[in-house]
Each structure stands twice: as C-alpha cells, then as structure tokens.
Amino acid sequence: MNDQARRPRPAKPYRRPKKDPVRMLAFEALRAVDERDAYANLVLPPLLRKAREKDGFETRDAALATELVYGTLRRQGTYDAIIASCVDRPLREVDPPVLDVLSLGAHQLLGTRIPSHAAVSASVELARVVLGDGRAKFVNAVLRKIAAHDLDGWLERVAPPYEDDPEEHLAVVHSHPRWIVTALWDALGGGRAGIEDLLEADNERPEVTLVARPGRSTTEELLAAVGEDSALPGRWSPYAVRLAEGGEPGALEAVREGRAGVQDEGSQLVALALASAPLEGPDERWLDGCAGPGGKAALLGALAAQRGAALLASEKQPHRARLVERALAGNPGPYQVIAADGTRPPWREGSFDRVLVDVPCSGLGALRRRPEARWRRRPEDVAGFATLQRDLLREALRAVRVGGVVGYATCSPHPAETRAVVEDVLKGRGAPAPAAEWIDARPFMQGVPVLGEGPDVQLWPHLHGTDAMYLALVRRTG
Ligand SMILES: C[S@@+](CC[C@H](N)C(=O)[O-])C[C@H]1O[C@@H](n2cnc3c(N)ncnc32)[C@H](O)[C@@H]1O
C-alpha cells in the first residue's frame, strides 16, 4: 500500500446548514399541530404574516408553505404507512419532530412536483437545522428509500389489496382512519367508486365560497370586485360566488363591511331551505339556536330582514356569541344575539315561527377544511354528541309554535348524528317532545341533483362540491 492510500481522507469542512424559511415555517406549523393540538388553519395565518414581514415571504412562498402543511397533514396516514416500511422500529418509537421532518419530506417526494433530489436535500438541510447533524443522516437514509418509488409504487407495496380488505385498502390509499372510512361508506352506501370519490374529495382543498348577503350585496358586485377571471357564480345557491385559488376574501370591500362573507355553499343551502319551507300564519320570529360563529345566522338575518321578520341568534359559548355579533353587525332588520344554553333556553315555548339548530357534531362532513381533524377524532366522539343533539332538537321543537318549522342540521353525514337523532325525537324515544312531522326538504334545494330519497337531505363534497351538510326539516304539529 502506498503512502497516499494510507493517509486518512481529509474531513469535509463543516458547512452550516442552509435555512429554508418555507420548510422551517412548515415544520413549525406541524410541530404546533402535533405538540399543542393546534389547528393548522389557525396556526398558519399568523406564521405566514410574520414570515411576510420578517423573511420577505412572497405569495408563492406562502402558497408552498400552506400546501406543504395541509398536504402533509391530510396524507399523514399514507405517509405513516410508507415511512413505517422504511424504518426498522415501530413509528411510535421515532421522535415526533423526526417524524414530522420525514412526513414533510415524504409529501414533497410523493405528493408534489418538487424534484426528488431537491426534496431530499431540502429535508436533510431542514433536519440539520432543527434536529442536528446526527439525526439528519437518519432522515437522509429514510428519504432515499422513499424516493425509490413513486406514490403508486408505494401504495402497491403498503396497502392491502382491495379484494382482501376493502376498508383498510381505502384507508391507506386515501389516508383516512379506517373507522372513518367505515362510517362514511355506511352513510353513503353504494360501491367502490362512490366512496373513493368521496375520500379523494376530502383530500382536496375546498374552494373559498362567498355569500352575497341578500339586500346587502349582490353576486354581481362580488364578481365585478374579484374580476371575472378569478371567480365564478355558485353552483347551487343564488347568493354564492366561488373564488379561484389564491383569492383573498379579506381584500373585498363587501366582505370587510360584512355585506358579504365566506360561507360554504352547503351551509348557504341549509339556511335557504329553512327560510323557504312554507308556513301558515305569522312568519315574524326566527331563531338560530346554535349560531356560533354565525355563518348561517348572518344569511338568515338578511333573509329575515327582507321579509320583515326578526332573528334571535343564540350561542352557548360567549366568545362564539361575540363572533355571531360580528357576523350580524349591520344586518338591515331587527336581530339580537345572546349567549344561552339551547338545552335550557331563556325563551318561552312556542315563541318562534322558524328555528334552526345546527348542532355540535363530529364534523366528519368537513374533513377537507381541517386537515388534522380526521386523526384527532375518535369513534366514541360520535356517541358523545348523541344526548346533546337530541336535547337541542327537542328544545327547538318546543321553541317553535305549532305549525312552525324546525331545521336540524349537522356538518356530519354519520347516520347516528343525522336521521337517527330526528327519528328518535319524533318518536319520543328517550324523552317526550312536542309532536312533529317530517317535511320533504328536497324541493327547497331546487336545482341541486342527487338529493336521495328524502325527506331529509344529505349533501356531499364529491357530488355537490359542498361540505357534507345534513338537513332535516320538521313541522311542529302539536
Ligand atoms: C356546528 S356549530 C354552528 C355553526 C353555525 N350555525 C354557523 O353556521 O356558523 C355548533 C355551535 O353550537 C354551539 N353549542 C354547543 N352546545 C350548545 C348548547 N347547549 N346550546 C347552544 N349552543 C351550543 C357550539 O358552541 C357551536 O358554536
């Protein structure tokens, strides 16, 4: 062996890791979601604001950071399965910050168009900054294994064949907890295509939809303000305008002035259907019994004003009642906002002509909005709402006069939170309730296709482009 061969290789000079503000921000947001149970949609805006001021973030950077956080959280189930097959210990033994860097890297490799070498090197640099050089080597090794296949290649390896275990297959491929796949499939019925479309729709970012509050703004005003290339009229609601990606509602004067707001079209349809159901006799006093944060209350308030009716918006949580105040500010007709428990209401029996109870629920119908929600919910949560939902519906039936209409709404399609609640209350199961009968809600969502067999209505993200809102209309008969 010659001298040269015996000489140790010169150590590479130490290079400081490069800080990439977009990945750093995405990591910080993921840690907050993980550690503090924070909501991504609440954590991100202040982080992005700070980055705009401090790091000169541009719209492009903010869009990438948002996509990295939302995409990583939504696809967490799939990425966990893939990462688990690339490490030699159970995932629960991998430090959570390391797992966050790996998931963020997996998303860049498998869920974006970022070239593999850039995804790996950006993740390793991030790991060097936030985890240290030792653990960065581990990250590098795992991500190189992940980079060996594309997403389809990985799904073939880590998801069981559909024929062997359909629910587990769908859970891994579409990144939902298995129990949610089961619950959604039960609610939706049908074969493989429908549930796959629904699960895929849950993984899409929902459009931002505006409502032009009737009598206060118009869709024409909103479309003109946004520009026709950047917005479209709603699909179903005559008051809806859909913003193109990146549209900023806060930039619109009508939104700043409360004449318009951000509201999913499904939520608009629920308020509109309740307002359209026919009534005999007076139609002067409307109640929203679970009003916070106030989307439906603001639309109901505007509709009530046009008809000369007054709205009482009631919400148990005082801080949410304040949000309702804000949503209703400037409403052209009479309204009042109170903080009250709808199960022990301060109003007299039979005080109202129309009542909405949009009850607290598991939120399984709005999974597209809260990317982390599906991993936080537990099957027992659904049963946890059962008593409250029934109590609120019973009290709503007491609040309405004989002949008046109650709308029972949830943002969950789970049968235990929807029809089962209404049937139990109408049949007097568990506790007595005023006599009431179903109203077919479908005619009050005119033009909306595939509403099922009625009398209640279930909207779906993949069929209607809305959250999976449920609405039952009932009339008090005695
Ligand atoms: C699904 S949200 C309502 C959303 C609202 N309708 C909207 O469109 O913005 C349910 C609301 O009911 C409230 N709530 C929970 N328990 C309640 C109770 N016992 N009485 C009245 N409101 C209650 C929650 O605080 C929450 O704000």
Image (cartoon, grey):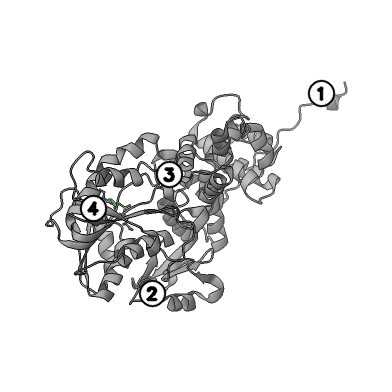
| Vertical position of residue 32 compared to residue 327: above or below | above
Graded by Cα atoms within 10 Å as few (under 14), some (14 to 19) or many (20 or more), the crowding at tag 1 reads few
* Closer to us: 123 or 368: 368
- Report which residue position mark 2 lands on: 254
Measured in 3D between alpha carbons, the distance from the residue under mark 1 to the one under mark 4, in whole angstroms, is 93 Å
At a point 29% along the width and 40% down the height, the residue shown is 386
Secondary-structure class at tag 2: helix
Q: Residue furthest right?
A: 2
| Vertical position of residue 271 compared to residue 21: above or below | below
At a point 52% along the width and 61% down the height, the residue shown is 56
Query: In the rendered structure, are the residues bearing label 3 and label 4 in contact, judged by CB atoms less than 8 Å apart?
Result: no
Left or right for 380, reference 350:
right
Residue type (three-letter) at the residue carrying disc 4:
Ala
The reply to whether residue 128 is in sight is no
Residue type (three-letter) at the residue carrying disc 1:
Arg
Mark identifier at residue 436 = 4
Left or right for 91, reference 411:
right
- Report which residue position mark 3 lands on: 373
Dot 2 or dot 4: first in sequence order is 2
Quadrant position of residue 474: bottom left
Query: In the rendered structure, are the residues bearing label 1 and label 4 in contact, judged by CB atoms less than 8 Å apart?
Result: no
Dot 2 or dot 3: first in sequence order is 2
Measured in 3D between alpha carbons, the distance from the residue under mark 1 to the one under mark 2, in whole angstroms, is 76 Å
Dot 1 or dot 3: first in sequence order is 1
